[in-house]
Structure formats: structure tokens, C-alpha cells
Amino acid sequence: MNAEHFFDQLWQDYIQITPQAEQIKQLFAATDGTVINDHVAFRTFADTPLQLDNLEPLILEMGYERQGSYDFTAKKLRAHSFIHPDPAVPKIFVSELLTDQLSPAAQQIIARYTAQIESQALSQAVFWSGRHWDVPTFAEYQALMEESEYGAWLLAIGVRVNHFTVSINHLTSTNCIRDTLQRVKDAGYAVNTVGGEVKGTPESLLEQGSTLADRQAYTFAGDDVQEIPTCFYEFALRHPDDQGVVYQGFIEANADKIFESTNAS
């Protein structure tokens, strides 16, 4: 599968549970024309057939190379970022939950469902495949949320794109992330304020911000309908280094706060 088709499929799946993204994209398209995507991100469970090491070859097959690796100790995650030789193709960020570092109770909840994942040949379609396990109970979701919001989100939503990202560098109406976020707020969308609305600085070469995730009714086991967070829309502004080269990587401290965009509270 080529990258263009991959991202088209991802977007169509994404906006089904993140309607704000299409609305915000159109908001900027009205003044800026084409809205360029900086990167997308995915979540998965370690030590399963869908672990990071099994997803990586699918990304490399599309012409990407691994760009960097990251550890999020507090959230018990590890991640890789991937970059394509064509600068017009968005970057990809994939993280996985290190379930063996969770409490025994949380591990038991997750294992009950990940044991249902079948080992099979994977294609790029896995990135919009959703759950590979039964629907959890709301009580399990809540219990996991107490320890790992990331894990609770993944257990309910499954393997689907977590967010797309507007490249502020490619906007014509502004080159300021604060102005961008203000425009989003003025349109009625809430933004993630954990660590401040803007994560990062020009000196760190990457500034990021995001909306709070959309919320939708979700039917848990036993026909228990509850409203939960789905996905969000991010905004990134990349700065040049001393040699004038625009930074293309990711910063752990920024990403750590961006993860909070799907918090239930």
C-alpha cells in the first residue's frame, strides 16, 4: 500500500469518531487552502501480536525509516517515530504500553482481552482495524483508567489512529501556534492545557498543542452505554536549528503532555 492511500484510509476512519477534526480542517482550509498533516500517532499493547515490533515492518514497507526511539517512564510506554524520504509525506509515531510494568490487577484486565488477539499476517489495514478483542465492561475501563488512561483508551478504541496533526509551518494565515490555538478556541473547541496550552519552545525547536478529544457514546459489555473520549487534533510548529535546518523529530516532554489529550476528566 502506498502512503497516499494509507493516509486517505486513516483519515476516513479517524473522522468517524473525531468529527471535530474535519470541522477544524475546513476552518483552516477556508483561509489557507490545503491543510498539510505533520504526523499521525498510534497506540498498541506490548507483548502481543500487535506489538510495536510487529507493526514497524508495515511502516517500513511504505518507504519509511525509523527516525528515533523514546521512553515514557511514568506512563510505562516506549515508542518509535518514522520519517519518509518524501518531506510531503507525514511522519508516523507509534507507542506501546509496557503492560508488564502495570499492577497485577491492571495486567489481568488487559490480558483477558489481549489473549484474544490472533497471530496472523498483518497488512497496513491493521492501523484502522479497531479492537481485536471483545468489548470490555465499563467497570474494567474505569479500573484501568485509574492506572493507565492510555491502556483504558486502547482497550475500548483498539488500534486506530490517535490523532492527525496540522502543520503550522505550511499555513499561510499564521506562523504562530498561540494564534492557531486561539482560532480553534474561538471556534468553540477546547484545547489541552496540561503543561500549558503550548508544549515546547522555539528554543527546543518544536512547539505543539492539541484539542481535547471528542467524546462519543460507546456501548460497553452488557449494553452499558457511556460517553468516553475518542481522538483529538494536534497542531505542530517546527523551528530551524542554528544551521537553518527545520527540526523533524519529536520531544518526549512534549509528547508526554500531548498524551493527556484523551484523558476522561
Image (cartoon, rainbow, N blue to C red):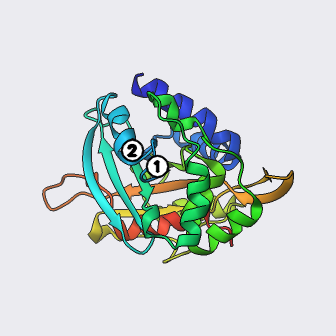
Side of 111 where 171 appears, left or right: left
Q: Is residue 79 something one can see in this rendering? A: yes
x and y percentages locating residue 246 in the rendered image: 25, 52
| Camera-nearest residue between 94 and 188 | 94
Check residue 153 in the rendering and tell me which mark sits there, or answer none. Answer: none
x and y percentages locating residue 99 in the rendered image: 47, 62
Residue at the disc numbered 2: 92
The quarter holding residue 176 reads bottom left
- In this picture, is 58 found above or below 180? above
The quarter holding residue 116 reads top right
**Residue at 36% of width from left, 35% of height from top?**
59
Side of 244 where 17 appears, left or right: right
Residue at the disc numbered 1: 41
Q: Is residue 231 something one can see in this rendering? A: no
x and y percentages locating residue 39 in the rendered image: 42, 46
Rounded to the nearest whole Å, what is the CA distance between mark 1 and mark 2?
6 Å
Instruction: Determine whether the residue tagged by mark 2 lies in a helix, strand or loop.
Output: strand
**Mark 2 neighbour class, 10 Å CA radius: few under 14, some 14 to 19, many 20 or more:** many
Work out which quarter of the rendered image holds the N terminus and state it. top left
Tags 1 and 2 in contact by the CB under 8 Å rule?
yes
Q: Residue furthest top?
A: 1
Q: Amino acid at mark 1?
A: Ala
**Mark 1 neighbour class, 10 Å CA radius: few under 14, some 14 to 19, many 20 or more:** some
Q: Earlier in the sequence, mark 1 or mark 2?
A: 1
**Residue at 48% of width from left, 50% of height from top?**
44
Q: Amino acid at mark 2?
A: Ile
| Camera-nearest residue between 85 and 47 | 47
